[in-house]
Amino acid sequence: MDIIKINENDNVAVAVKAMKKGTIINVDGRSIEVLQRIPEGHKIAIKPIADATPVIKYGYPIGNASADIKPGEWVHTHNLKTALSGLVDYNYEPVHSRRRHDETVPLQYDGYVRENGSTGTRNEVWIVPTVGCVNGIARELEKRAASLVKGSIEAIASFAHPYGCSQLGEDQENTRKILADIINHPNAGGVLVLGLGCENTGIEVLKEYIGEYDERRVKFLKCQDTENELEDGMKLLEELVDYASRFERTKISAGKLIVGLKCGGSDGFSGITANPLVGRFSDLLVEQGGTTILTEVPEMFGAETILMNRAKDEKVFDDTVSLINNFKCYYEDAGQPIYENPSPGNKAGGISTLEDKSLGCTQKSGTSEVQGVLEYGERVRESGLNLLSAPGNDLVASTALAASGAQVILFTTGRGTPFASPVPTIKISSNTPLADKKSNWIDFNAGPIAEDKTIDDLARLLLAYVLEVASGKKVKSEIYGYRDMAIFKKGVTL
């Protein structure tokens, strides 16, 4: 296989491997001579495309040609430009979406049921600083507390961040909401909230955002009020470990699973292999009664109507319109271009415009109805597919997914990345060479879809793998001890 034509209406195809000038390819019963070298994962014209007319991929326009393009020519940033503009008026045109099948065989995983009925995939003790000033103390406590791990406790982890003080308005609200969400996350059997004592987001303020909590599960330490914060911190961690170690894994319906969907470092195969694979997984989990959350709103631009028209009702449609336009206003208010994407790495991998990236990105949503739209820092309430307001940045978006309730995150990549998030983050490669080269980063390979496997074959394997991870199997970033948390920065710093 030299090329992949994704949709019958496309006027470009994707090169499965680099092709030399003069190579002959066959498309729809026609022979086309390759007129110039085509890099792997990049687009080749398979029909004449006139200047200023749409280039079609995935069955949708990914921009307009900026010159006449002949069949066999390379199609990329030199002859293709975005056709996107500013705010748009949308009409609700509902389309049929995938629904749960009655004959679906119920699946389970081995997870943890908390005192409040919530469920987690890990039983860890977390150290959450209220302010960046105590990050060093948090890391030292994490190091010292490694010796306390026992029974069902799987890790003791701290989550450093630079915020919690010198913030105003929405920026400060973001920090408080995310910290409270992380503290309440069911993957943590116990949490030590570590404060300094003079910060804006102090312990007493943060308690208002946390709401009701179990005093056995959540402990607080204000470092300015104690003579030796390390000794006192260790005593509290011992109490938390004693409490959390009582939890044991038990059978839980897959319908209780909440999985975040994210992509980063995409290439020309991401929208053909890894992202559609995750979309098929999402449909399978939704059929089980489970929940998936799609985010990175700027990478919905250009494909947003696909999601809007799958809204379960007009309210969800209106919420999706607000989700999109509010993020466009965020860029405009800051005096920045709305359509700065794709990144240099994306372009090197074969993605030319934001429409190209977005149409590939939204493949992760599958075909299910959109059940709800979440503000940044809002916890998921509706089972099924949800949309979450967060930027495209990998660490910020993945943290937002965890904060909204995701117990596991699926992260597709065509370039590779080692980062982690507060919850198990499964790295899915879009191509086999990446999976082979970075086997210490990649957990699951979607590359065979471009070789000899079907999406359905791999989707069943991915679902089984996710249930294994939910049941305790460590992903690569967990094995290496990587932990990351990043909060969305909006506004000035005092």
Image (cartoon, grey):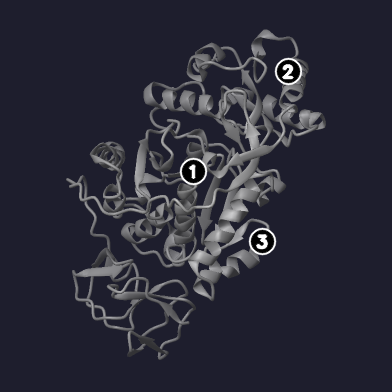
Q: Position of residue 384 (x, y in %)?
A: 42, 43
**Foreground residue, 43 or 131?**
43
Which SS class for mark 3? loop
Q: Which residue is mark 2?
A: 236
Q: Residue at x 69, y 30 (%)?
A: 139
* Alpha carbons under labels 1 and 2: distance apart: 35 Å
Along the line of sight, which residue is nearer the eye, 79 or 7?
7
Residue that badge 3 annotates? 439
Counting residues from the start of the chain, the first of labels 3 and 1 encountered is 1
464 left or right, relative to 278? right
The amino acid marked with disc number 2 is: Leu
**Residue that protrudes farthest toward the right in the picture:** 147
Tell me the quarter of the image containing the C terminus. top left
Q: Position of residue 290 (x, y in %)?
A: 49, 43
Q: Looking at the image, can residue 66 be seen?
A: yes
The amino acid sitting under disc 3 is Ser
- Going from N to C along the chain, the mark reached first, 2 or 3, is 2
- CB under 8 Å between callouts 2 and 3? no
Q: Residues within 10 Å of mark 1 (few under 14, many from 20)?
A: many
Mark 2 secondary-structure assignment? helix
Tell me, yes or no, if residue 345 can be seen here. Answer: no
Residue 379, which numbered label? none
* Relative to 94, 163 lies left or right: right
Place of residue 140 in the rendered image (x, y in percent of width and height, measured from the top left) = 73, 28
Question: What residue is pinned by disc 1?
Answer: 290
